[in-house]
Each structure stands twice: as structure tokens, then as C-alpha cells.
């Protein structure tokens, strides 16, 4: 049996190249899954991570100002509360440290192979195994769990001349600390969640900053503050207190769902708060008008910031609303003919969300990739399994996204579901377990039904929540507790199991 060494010296170990379970990715989802397996006593698994550290989103997004926009007490694992969060909304370094700490504490490092970029995964129907090709060699596993992230691969805009730019060019999710911004003329393309964090963080340092805006986002105040020592003391000594705070935050954030999915008029007070925030922070009526969104709040992700508007209104900043016509070696030219000399260009242009790169790499029973199967839209059973892809599970797959509350809640719901499925495979001695097309169709209808009338479809915006057909294939369109409830008991009736030594008989 061949083996491969895991990396960090403190947990050096050897991982078998043939394991029962292969997990792709070590962000919140991959880590959560690995910890669940360890806690159940399952150690026959490997985590394949293309980078050289765990953390996913929080390892990769190191741009100045990067922080979570859901309070840390909620945006953390339920099994690993952290009494030491320094602020209510922690910054990237603290979240990354928390994830590394969790990986070390729960023994995940010794299962993780870094530098293992999964380039292809193919189901071998004879051996009932996944053959996983990576840049660190081949792995085989009975079960493949993809935790490759929905916001893991940056998108680069298709702008004429972008490649000819001779200044410093970087995506916000691939920040280069070596780039000196002092006294530079900077352009930031995009005004989404990352842009509104990075713009105020760098604006005081640069000579000038041009923010290229296609659509203005709705922004509400951010109630961020340092966590008092007394609160940290209570969290440390009374874990139930921290749990109660977490519960309250959860309930408060869930209430937003009512407005987004059922009673859009309930979003009006939120929109009023956002409008008042803009009015308070931006005096210039022309700039204010340019910063006012033209869609209902909630249609796109609601952003939180206290310093974005002041940064854009600063004397060295300019909000550019004309489209970008082309990028030249040392400037950006807009459709109104204005050319702005630029030393550094920051692309805060988001991620491949509805066209997940991992979907192009995983091939099912009939040799087609997930991307090919999903040509007409991403379909799954309960956001987690796909007909034709035996023993494969997707964490943070289609319709798991939540714009208003913590993704970790959704991840933990899915992890518990997948773990039940794994126990069914073991308990029934199955070689393979595969969901049915009927279950998938029923789930598709459920999502379509729940999405009807939601602000994401009816709010008058074009958001990355919707796929190229205009379908909601990213967000869970209901209360998150209903998602958890749906996944709390494994729906064995929606699966076909193949006893070891037999062929799978499933309708195509
Ligand atoms: C800047 C930013 C801020 C955010 N803030 C919040 C927030 O406040 N609250 C919230 O709920 N959510 C937030 N999110 C969403 C966030 O992505 C999720 O909360 C969560 O971190 C996702 O975890 P994940 O494990 O699913 O994916 P990721 O964290 O993206 O991890 C995926 C991992 O898979 C690896 N990988 C991908 N492809 C391969 C491959 N082919 N082979 C091997 N490894 C691979 C990646 O390297 C990565 O380590 C934010 C996202 C961003 C980008």
C-alpha cells in the first residue's frame, strides 16, 4: 500500500493513498466533516487540499480589511466555541487562526495532504471506488466528499486590454502583500462584499482611488465592537452563556428570511435604515444618488460597513459609474472617454459560484462530468447528492448559500446528513449508495416552489445568486432551521444501495 506524508511538522503522519473516504478541501466544510469523522471514531479518511494550509476562504482572502460579516459567535463551529474572539466581527487573521487551531486540536492535519490539487475524479463502477487524480498523485476512495468551496475560485472580468496592464494587477482573493500601495494611484473594480472592505482599508494610504461601480449595493451600519474582557471571561467560564448569545444572534438573523422569501414588504424598514445610513454618511447629493441602489434591498447580498461611504466620499477617491471600455498598460479608460492613470488595479470581481470549477472535474457512472449533467442547471437531492454519482457528497453545494446568516450552520447540517449516509453504507455493508432521479426532481420542484416570489427573483437585480437561466441555484430559500430539519434524518428511501459484490441497477 503506497502512502504519502502530510505536511505540518507538528502533526507529521503518513496517509494511505487508498482510503475509505476522500474529502476535497479544508475550509470550514472540509474541516467540519473531518472533525465529525474523527469524533465518531472513523479515521480511514484523507483530506486533499490544493493549498499549503487549511482555512479555505480565510486562508485566501488576506486583503486589507477582510473580516466576516456575520458575528463570530455565530460564524464558528458549534463544537468549538471560541471565548477569545477579539471583536464581534472578527478579522481574517483571527478566523484563520481559529481554523488552524481547530484542525490541530481535532487531529485533522494528520489526515491532510497539502499541495494536492484535485484535477479529476472518476467513479470506477467495477471497483466501486473513486479514482482521484491530484497534483500530489493518485488516491482511491470508496466515498468522495467535495468540500471545494462555492467562493473559492476568483472570477477575472473579461475587459479588453486587461492582460496588457503593466502596473500591479491582483484579485482581492489573491492579495499580494508585497505590492506597495503608498502614494499609488489605485483602481478597484467591483463594489461587492470584498470591495466595500478593501476600499476603506487602503484609501487613506494611496494617492488616489477610483472605485469602478456597475451596481450600487445596499449597505447597513456595522455594529462591530471589541468584545469586553468581562464577556470573554463569561464565555470561557460559562459556555452556556456564549451558546445563548449565539442562539439570540441566530434568531435575529433568521427573521430577515421572512422578508426575503415571504413578505417582501418587511424589508422596507431595513431599506429605510440603509437609506438613512447613506444620507448620514454622504452629504453630496450627486454622489449619494450614484450610491443609491436601483433594486429592492436583499435582492443582492446586504452589505455592512461604517467606513465604505466615507472612504468613497474622501477627497482622494472617485466613484466611477461609467462602464470600463478598456484597460491600457498604465490606465483604465471608461466608456465616457475618460482615461485614469493607474498604478495598481484591484479586481474585487467575485467568484465562480454557479459554474463551480470542481463540477468540471468529477465524472460519474456514465463518464459525464457534474458540469455536463448540470448543463440545464444544478440539480441535487437535498443539495448534497446527485443521481449518477454514487458515494459522492457535496458540501456547500447548490442551494446551501445563505446571504443573511452563518454558512457554518448550513455546513454542520450537511455534515450530519453525510455522516448518517456513511453509517448507512457501513451498516448495510454497501459498496455504493446513490440517490434517485425522482428524489432530485422532487427537490428541484421544492426549491423552485420556495423561490417563487422571493426578493432574489423579484427584487429587480441581476445577482450572482441566479444561474444563467435565471434560476436560484445557490441560495436556500427558506428558514435555515428547515434546512437542518430536512437533513436531520437520512432519507434512505431516496437512495438505491448496492450490496458489496453486486452491480448498481438504477434507471439512467
Ligand atoms: C471574503 C469572504 C467573506 C466571507 N464572509 C462570510 C461571513 O461573514 N459569513 C458567512 O457565513 N460566510 C462568509 N463567506 C462565505 C464563506 O466562503 C463560507 O462561509 C465558508 O468559509 C465556506 O467554506 P467551504 O469549506 O465551503 O469553502 P472554502 O473555504 O472556499 O474552502 C474550500 C477549500 O477547497 C480547496 N479546493 C478547492 N478546489 C480544490 C481542488 N480541486 N483540489 C483540492 N482542493 C481544492 C480550496 O483551496 C479551499 O481550501 C465569505 C466568503 C468570502 C470570500
Image (cartoon, rainbow, N blue to C red):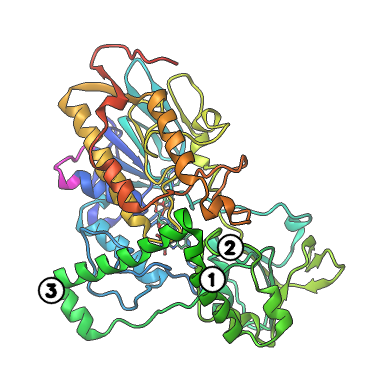
Q: Which quadrant holds the N terminus?
A: top left
SS type, badge 2: loop
The image quadrant of residue 95 is bottom left
**Where's residue 152, x and y in %?**
48, 52
Marks 1 and 2 close (CB-CB < 8 Å): yes
Q: Main secondary structure of the magenta part?
A: loop
The image quadrant of residue 180 is bottom right
Q: Which residue is mark 1?
A: 271
Give the camera-side residue of 443 and 349: 443
* Residue ID at (77%, 63%): 323
Disc 3 or disc 2, which is closer to the eye? 2
* Residue ID at (57%, 64%): 192
Q: Which quadrant holds the C terminus?
A: top left
* Crowd around label 1: few <14 · some 14–19 · many ≥20 (10 Å): some
Q: Would you say 430 lies left or right of 30 here?
A: left
Q: Which residues are magenta?
A: 38-44
**Where's residue 83, x and y in %?**
22, 73
Amino acid at each position: 500500500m503506497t502512502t504519502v506524508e502530510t505536511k505540518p511538522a507538528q502533526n507529521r503522519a503518513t496517509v494511505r493513498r487508498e482510503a475509505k473516504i476522500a474529502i476535497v478541501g479544508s475550509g470550514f466544510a472540509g474541516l467540519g466533516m473531518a472533525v465529525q469523522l474523527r469524533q465518531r471514531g472513523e479515521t480511514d479518511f484523507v483530506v486533499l487540499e490544493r493549498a499549503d494550509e487549511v482555512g479555505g476562504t480565510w486562508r485566501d482572502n488576506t486583503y486589507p480589511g477582510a473580516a466576516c460579516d456575520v458575528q463570530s459567535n455565530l460564524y464558528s463551529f458549534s463544537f468549538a466555541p471560541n471565548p477569545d474572539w477579539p471583536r464581534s466581527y472578527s478579522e481574517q487573521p483571527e478566523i484563520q487562526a481559529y481554523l488552524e487551531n481547530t484542525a490541530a486540536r481535532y487531529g485533522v492535519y494528520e489526515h491532510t495532504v497539502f499541495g494536492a490539487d484535485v484535477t479529476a475524479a472518476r467513479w470506477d463502477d467495477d471497483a466501486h471506488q473513486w479514482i482521484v487524480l491530484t497534483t500530489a498523485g493518485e488516491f482511491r476512495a470508496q466515498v468522495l466528499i467535495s468540500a471545494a468551496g462555492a467562493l473559492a475560485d476568483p472570477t477575472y472580468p473579461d475587459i479588453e486590454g486587461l492582460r496588457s496592464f503593466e502596473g500591479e494587477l491582483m484579485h482581492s482573493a489573491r492579495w499580494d502583500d508585497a505590492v506597495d500601495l503608498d502614494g499609488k494611484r489605485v483602481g478597484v473594480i467591483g463594489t461587492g462584499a470584498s470591495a466595500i472592505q478593501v476600499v476603506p482599508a487602503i484609501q487613506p494610504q494611496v494617492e488616489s482611488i477610483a472605485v469602478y461601480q456597475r451596481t450600487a449595493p445596499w449597505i447597513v451600519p456595522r455594529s462591530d465592537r471589541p468584545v469586553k474582557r468581562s464577556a470573554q471571561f463569561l464565555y470561557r467560564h460559562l459556555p452556556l452563556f456564549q451558546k445563548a448569545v449565539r442562539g439570540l444572534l441566530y434568531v435575529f438573523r433568521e427573521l430577515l428570511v421572512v422578508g426575503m422569501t415571504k413578505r417582501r414588504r418587511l424589508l422596507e424598514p431595513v431599506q429605510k435604515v440603509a437609506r438613512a445610513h447613506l444620507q448620514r454618511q454622504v452629504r453630496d447629493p450627486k454622489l449619494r444618488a450614484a450610491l443609491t441602489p436601483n433594486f429592492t434591498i436583499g435582492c443582492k447580498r446586504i452589505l455592512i460597513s461604517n467606513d465604505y461611504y466615507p472612504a468613497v466620499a474622501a477627497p482622494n477617491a472617485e466613484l466611477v459609474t461609467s462602464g470600463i471600455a478598456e484597460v491600457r498598460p498604465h490606465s483604465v479608460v471608461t466608456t465616457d472617454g475618460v482615461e485614469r492613470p493607474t498604478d495598481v488595479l484591484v479586481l474585487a470581481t467575485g467568484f465562480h459560484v454557479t459554474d463551480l470549477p470542481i463540477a468540471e472535474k468529477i465524472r460519474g457512472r456514465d463518464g459525464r462530468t457534474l458540469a455536463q449533467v448540470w448543463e440545464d442547471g444544478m440539480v441535487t437531492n437535498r443539495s448534497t447528492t446527485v443521481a449518477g454519482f454514487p458515494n459522492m457528497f457535496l458540501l456547500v453545494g447548490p442551494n446551501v448559500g445563505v446571504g443573511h446568516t452563518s454558512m457554518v450552520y448550513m455546513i454542520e447540517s450537511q455534515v450530519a446528513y453525510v455522516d448518517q449516509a456513511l453509517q448507512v453504507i457501513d451498516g448495510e455493508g454497501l459498496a455504493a449508495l446513490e440517490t434517485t432521479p425522482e428524489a432530485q426532481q422532487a427537490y428541484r420542484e421544492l426549491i423552485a416552489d420556495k423561490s417563487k416570489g422571493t426578493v432574489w427573483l423579484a427584487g429587480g437585480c441581476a445577482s450572482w445568486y441566479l444561474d444563467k437561466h435565471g434560476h436560484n441555484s445557490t441560495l436556500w430559500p427558506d428558514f435555515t432551521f428547515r434546512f437542518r430539519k430536512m437533513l436531520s434524518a437520512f432519507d434512505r428511501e431516496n437512495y438505491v444501495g448496492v450490496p458489496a459484490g453486486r452491480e448498481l441497477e438504477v434507471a439512467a
